[in-house]
Amino acid sequence: MPELDVKVRRRYGRTRVYVSTAEPEPRAIGWYDPVTGTHQLDDPALSADFWSAATAESERLRASGKIAKIVPPDVPSPLRRAHPVGTALARLVGVRTDARSYAGGSRGERKVGRALDKYAARDGWHVLHGVQVGDGGTDIDHVVVGPFGVVTVNTKRTSAAVRVGDHAIWVGGHEVPYLVKSRAEARRAYKRLLSAGCDIPVRPALVFVGQQDFQRGRAGHPGDAQTDVAVLPGPGALRDWINRLPIVLDAGDMATVYAVARRGDTWLT
């Protein structure tokens, strides 16, 4: 286990536990708000060490009376899938969790997230997972930063057939509002990054996994064309689409955008 540095900071009425590696090479690992359950994990490889340190510090804060309770990690994260640290923390604070209630809906996020981490390591991208936006509990499954700018990824898992029309999507024969949500996520991300000083294009992608069939057709109804949203049949297709995007950032600008995107206050304030 690496030597860790744990700090508690209180800003904008929030209490956060920040965990980083210690000297001589300090590096942020992530932060956790034990009062709301929100968190950001910047280094998934150190997930177990992060949660061990964050949990211990959170319990110390509760025992000292500095916080009244501890809320288990919020669901827009890898802990959504009954992660052992998440369930252990839930037991610690006396909150009942039902792992099965999270497992189905987030399985697709896991698959796409693992693929994105692999692609990012290979292609030099940066990926953030489960990005909470604002205080209303809204989150973006994945945010990808690279030479192409920023891509927001909305992941949907289904065993039914998927049909993509000019202006609508049907899953199992039923029209679904996924295009609207994907557009809204990209607009929200653009506005947040712009407010933080990064005027950068943000493109939305909608990725399906587990479907029986994936077809593109001409049927649809009047409205905004879905050509502004990349609707894709899996993480491999997502990578192919991203690699066809025009380059808009050099290495320095990409690092700057990622530094801004990984800050919690970019998304929560």
Image (cartoon, rainbow, N blue to C red):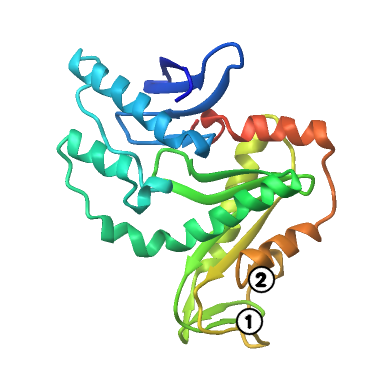
Q: Image point 56% across, 77% down: which residue?
A: 169
Does residue 35 appear anywhere in the picture? yes
Closer to the N terminus: mark 2 or mark 1? 1
Residue matched to label 2:
226
Q: Image point 55% across, 64% down: which residue?
A: 180
- Residue at the outermost front position: 1
Task: Name the secondary structure under disc 1.
Answer: loop
Place of residue 106 in the rendered image (x, y in percent of width and height, measured from the top left)? 41, 59
Q: Amino acid at mark 1?
A: Gly
Place of residue 124 in the rendered image (x, y in percent of width and height, measured from the top left)? 74, 43
In front here: 51 or 132? 51
Check if mark 2's residue and mark 1's residue have beta carbons within 8 Å.
yes
How much space separates mark 2 and mark 1, taking CA atoms?
8 Å
Place of residue 88 in the rendered image (x, y in percent of width and height, measured from the top left)? 24, 39
Residue matched to label 1:
165
Task: Name the secondary structure under disc 2.
Answer: helix
In front here: 263 or 61? 61
Q: Image point 67% across, 63% down: which residue?
A: 238
In front here: 176 or 68? 68
Asked whether, in this view, residue 248 is left or right of residue 211, the answer is right
